[in-house]
Image (cartoon, helix red, strand yellow):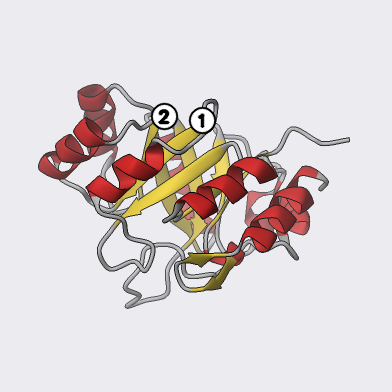
């Protein structure tokens, strides 16, 4: 008996990874547009890859403090269902992106301590979804995808206006516990299903989705 958990596999770079995510039962696939990331795609490659995603699976583009020129080029070329803003975008910027592109926007918020939860309340008023991620270590090159978890008990019994998704250090071994501890109905995984940085592993994708759906 599967529960109603939605899984997002982020940082996909090739058709094999997309196939594995779709076959495993993921409801979202994520493409990363951030040159510092080992999961970075250029727009032409992403356009081809997006065409490979089965109907009914939400295609999400992860960007970091992208300007309108970048988002214009991205949305013109790639058929997307959602934009994920993973930088230090302001509430005003989130609203602007929603209005300009007419796509749902997911805002990533890094959480390291209880004080960070205030931002979740703030952004849940404007974003369509909130991604609750581990706060990157000081000086880190990447705002996410660092394979780090945070203290899940911070999220217990919390309710926000927007649907939210749990990210940060999730793996096939800990995702069920994370769901139980936080009450998350959606989880997002990138490095936790890789054999090496940026290289997705089909067996790990299947194991993670199974673990989440059976949590």
For the residue pair 61 and 113, the one nearer the viewer reads as 61
Label 1 CA crowd tier, 10 Å (few <14, some 14–19, many 20+) = some
Q: Nearer the viewer, mark 1 or mark 2?
A: 1
Name the disc covering residue 125, or none.
2
Residue most extreme to the right: 1
For the residue pair 8 and 161, the one nearer the viewer reads as 8
For the residue pair 196 and 98, the one nearer the viewer reads as 196
Determine whether, in the image, residue 196 is placed left or right of residue 33: right
Determine whether, in the image, residue 133 is placed left or right of residue 44: right
The x, y position of residue 138, in whole percent, is 37, 76
Residue at which label 1 appears: 162
Name the disc covering residue 124, or none.
none
Q: In the rendered structure, are the residues bearing label 1 and label 2 in contact, judged by CB atoms less than 8 Å apart?
A: yes
Q: Residue at x 45, y 38 (%)?
A: 52
Separation (CA) of disc 1 from disc 2: 7 Å
Determine whether, in the image, residue 215 is placed left or right of residue 92: right
* Vertical arrangement, residue 90 with respect to residue 54, above or below: below
Q: Secondary structure at mark 1?
A: loop
Label 2 CA crowd tier, 10 Å (few <14, some 14–19, many 20+) = some
Q: Is residue 149 visible?
A: no
Q: Is residue 45 visible?
A: yes
Looking at the rendering, which quadrant does residue 213 occupy?
top right
The x, y position of residue 5, in whole percent, is 70, 38
Residue most extreme to the left: 69
Q: Residue at x 46, y 54 (%)?
A: 12
């Amino acid at each position: 008996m599967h529960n109603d958990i939605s899984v997002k596999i982020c940082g996909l770079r090739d058709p094999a990874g997309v196939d594995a995510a779709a076959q495993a039962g993921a409801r979202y696939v994520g493409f990363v547009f951030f040159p510092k990331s080992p999961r970075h795609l250029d727009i032409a490659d992403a356009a081809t890859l997006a065409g490979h995603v089965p109907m009914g699976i939400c295609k999400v583009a992860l960007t970091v403090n992208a300007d309108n020129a970048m988002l214009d080029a991205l949305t013109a070329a790639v058929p997307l269902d959602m934009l994920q803003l993973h930088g230090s975008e302001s509430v005003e910027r989130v609203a602007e992106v929603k209005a300009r592109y007419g796509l749902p926007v997911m805002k990533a918020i890094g959480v390291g301590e209880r004080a960070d939860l205030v931002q979740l309340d703030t952004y849940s008023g404007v974003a369509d979804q909130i991604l609750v991620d581990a706060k990157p270590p000081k000086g880190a090159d990447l705002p996410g995808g660092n394979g780090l978890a945070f203290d899940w008990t911070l999220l217990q019994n919390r309710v926000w206006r927007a649907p939210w998704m749990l990210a940060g250090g999730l793996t096939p071994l800990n995702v069920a516990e994370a769901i139980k501890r936080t009450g998350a109905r959606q989880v997002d995984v990138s490095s936790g299903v890789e054999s090496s940085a940026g290289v997705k592993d089909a067996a790990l994708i299947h194991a993670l989705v199974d673990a989440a759906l059976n949590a």
